[in-house]
Image: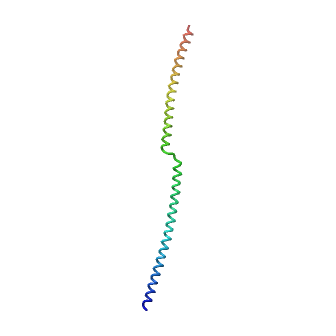
Amino acid sequence: MNDVPLREHVRELMLEREKAQNATFQATLRETELKSMEVERRLGQLNELRNEVLTDRARFIERTEVDLQLKNIREKIESLSEWKSKTIGYISAVIFIISILSSFIATTVTIWIQK
């Protein structure tokens, strides 16, 4: 007769333990779902950030292209500088020739008038 109450007591203990384990399992499932949702949210934010970075990166030109453009600009500036120097030299020579011709004409006119 004493076996029956002990058996019921053990059965009740096992049921209580099973209920506690189920409650713990359910709480763990809920916590896992919440953490999974948080991870998904963060991954979504990281994907948005990645897309923003890719969009920003697409707006910039590559360094090699910038270097090539700078090289071309420097060559054009150097070419213009050489052209400017040559032009100044030619203008100086023309002015020198004009001043010599002016002196020659002035001297000739002066001599011609004195005669």
> In the rendered view, does 2 fall on the left or right side of 41?
left
Q: Residue furthest top?
A: 115
Q: Nearer the viewer, residue 29 or 3?
A: 3
Q: Nearer the viewer, residue 7 or 69?
A: 7
Q: Nearer the viewer, residue 4 or 112?
A: 4
Q: Is residue 103 above or below residue 65?
A: above
Identity of the residue drawn at 48% across and 41% down: 67
How many numbered markers are drawn? Answer: 0
The percent position of residue 108, horizontal first and vertical second, equals 54, 12
Identity of the residue drawn at 49% across and 63% down: 39
Q: Is residue 15 above or below residue 111?
A: below
The percent position of residue 71, horizontal first and vertical second, equals 48, 38
The way the protein has been coloured in the rendering is: rainbow
Q: Is residue 46 above or below residue 107?
A: below
Q: Nearer the viewer, residue 83 or 38?
A: 38
Q: Is residue 41 above or below residue 86?
A: below
Q: Look at the image and tell me in which quarter the C terminus lies.
A: top right
Identity of the residue drawn at 52% across and 19% down: 97
The percent position of residue 3, horizontal first and vertical second, equals 42, 89
Q: Look at the image and tell me in which quarter the N terminus lies.
A: bottom left
Q: Residue furthest right?
A: 113
Determine which quarter of the picture holds residue 2.
Answer: bottom left
> In the rendered view, does 44 fall on the left or right side of 3?
right
The percent position of residue 48, horizontal first and vertical second, equals 53, 57
Identity of the residue drawn at 51% across and 20% down: 96
